[in-house]
Structure formats: structure tokens, C-alpha cells
Image (cartoon, rainbow, N blue to C red):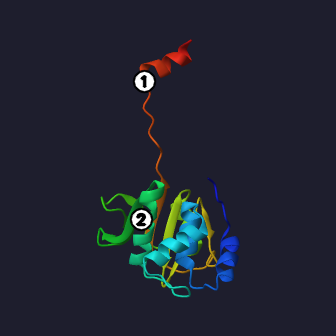
């Protein structure tokens, strides 16, 4: 089921619930294309109180649980110093993502298409296919956490008879 809410639509819904400091809940709903109420309930189940933000480790815990339930693959990136000169973003296996001088306003130049949860100082935001879905769009806030979120493709097992249907 496609939700496709915008940042503003979800923000209005959150305000109606007398909530604020909900950046991680909105960003999770947007990056996973999940219903805001479902995401809000998951964060509350794991200790988030209305009106209070949560630290990155708790955001990640919530996303990991939602990813497992809804079929997403997560890749976490960290900044790493290489060649005594450069900082780069790499995953757990040291696969290169991009140079580390990443800010909200230059993210699309380095990340391109794809879906990411980005962390900046005391804030989380959604980045979906080259577009920042957040009030911080076009600002020079330094990114200090990156989590790539990809929908897993369901594998289908075909039999010999399935292929024979296409040959006839």
C-alpha cells in the first residue's frame, strides 16, 4: 500500500496530536513510506515521549525493527579518515559512499538517487531520490550520520513449467 505523504502533511498530523520534536518519526515515515501513526506508535513503544526527541541510537533501533517487519535493507555509514588526507563515508565493509564534507544542501551532489535517513546535530531528516524532505533543505548543516534504506525485492521461484508458458 502506497502512503506517499509529504513532510508538511505529516507535520500537520503530528501537530494535531499535540506533538513536536518529531523529526525522527516524520523522517522514518517518509523514508520507509509508512503511515505516520504506525511509526509514531513504534517510537512510543520504544520509549519516545510526545514532545521529546530521541538520540540517533534510538532512531536506529526503531528503524531496524520497522525494517525487519516491513522488508527493508539498512546500510549504516560512518565517516572514516583515509590516506592521512581525506575523510570519506564508508559502510561496515569499508565500501565507499562519498567524501565526508556532506551538508544538507550538497547531499544530492554526493548521494544522488536513493533513500537515506540523515543525522545532523540534534536532528534527523529524510532524503528521498535526490530531495531533502525537511525544513532543513538547502541549509549548510553538517551531516554526521547516514543510514541507507532500501526496500527488499521479493525473490520469486519459478519452475520449468512457468517458463514454458512464455515460449508457446
x then y, percent, for residue 144: 44, 77
Q: Is residue 46 left or right of residue 114?
A: left
Q: Is residue 21 above or below residue 119?
A: below
Q: Residue 160 is drawn in which quadrant?
A: top left
The structure residue drawn at horizontal position 54% and vertical position 74%, both measured from the top left corner, is 40
Q: Is residue 102 above or below residue 4?
A: below
Q: Residues within 10 Å of mark 2 (few under 14, many from 20)?
A: few
Q: Residue 34 is drawn in which quadrant?
A: bottom right
The structure residue drawn at horizontal position 49% and vertical position 78%, both measured from the top left corner, is 44
x then y, percent, for residue 107: 54, 68
For label 2, the residue is 65
Q: Specify whether residue 127 is in view.
A: no
The structure residue drawn at horizontal position 45% and vertical position 75%, both measured from the top left corner, is 45
Q: Is residue 83 left or right of residue 68?
A: left
Q: Specify whether residue 167 is in view.
A: yes
For label 1, the residue is 159
Q: Is residue 21 left or right of residue 64?
A: right
Badge 1 element: loop
Q: Quadrant of the C terminus?
A: top right
Closer-to-camera residue (91/125): 125
Sequence order check, earlier mark of 1 and 2: 2
Q: Is residue 166 left or right of residue 146?
A: right
x then y, percent, for residue 112: 55, 58
Amino acid at each position: 500500500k502506497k502512503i506517499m505523504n509529504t513532510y508538511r502533511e505529516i507535520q500537520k498530523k503530528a501537530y494535531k496530536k499535540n506533538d513536536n520534536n518529531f523529526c525522527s518519526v516524520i523522517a522514518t515515515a517518509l523514508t520507509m513510506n509508512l503511515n505516520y501513526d504506525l511509526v509514531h506508535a513504534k517510537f512510543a513503544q520504544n520509549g519516545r515521549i510526545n514532545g521529546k526527541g530521541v538520540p540517533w541510537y534510538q532512531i536506529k533501533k526503531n528503524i531496524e525493527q520497522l525494517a525487519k517487519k516491513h522488508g527493508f535493507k539498512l546500510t549504516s555509514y560512518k565517516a572514516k579518515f583515509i590516506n592521512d588526507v581525506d575523510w570519506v563515508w564508508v559502510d561496515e565493509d569499508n565500501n565507499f559512499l562519498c567524501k565526508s564534507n556532506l551538508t544538507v544542501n550538497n547531499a544530492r551532489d554526493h548521494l544522488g538517487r536513493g533513500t537515506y535517513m540523515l543525522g545532523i546535530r540534534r536532528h534527523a531528516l529524510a532524503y528521498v531520490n535526490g530531495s531533502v524532505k525537511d525544513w532543513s533543505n538547502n541549509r549548510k548543516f553538517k551531516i554526521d550520520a547516514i543510514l541507507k534504506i532500501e526496500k527488499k525485492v521479493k525473490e520469486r521461484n519459478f519452475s520449468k513449467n512457468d517458463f514454458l508458458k512464455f515460449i508457446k
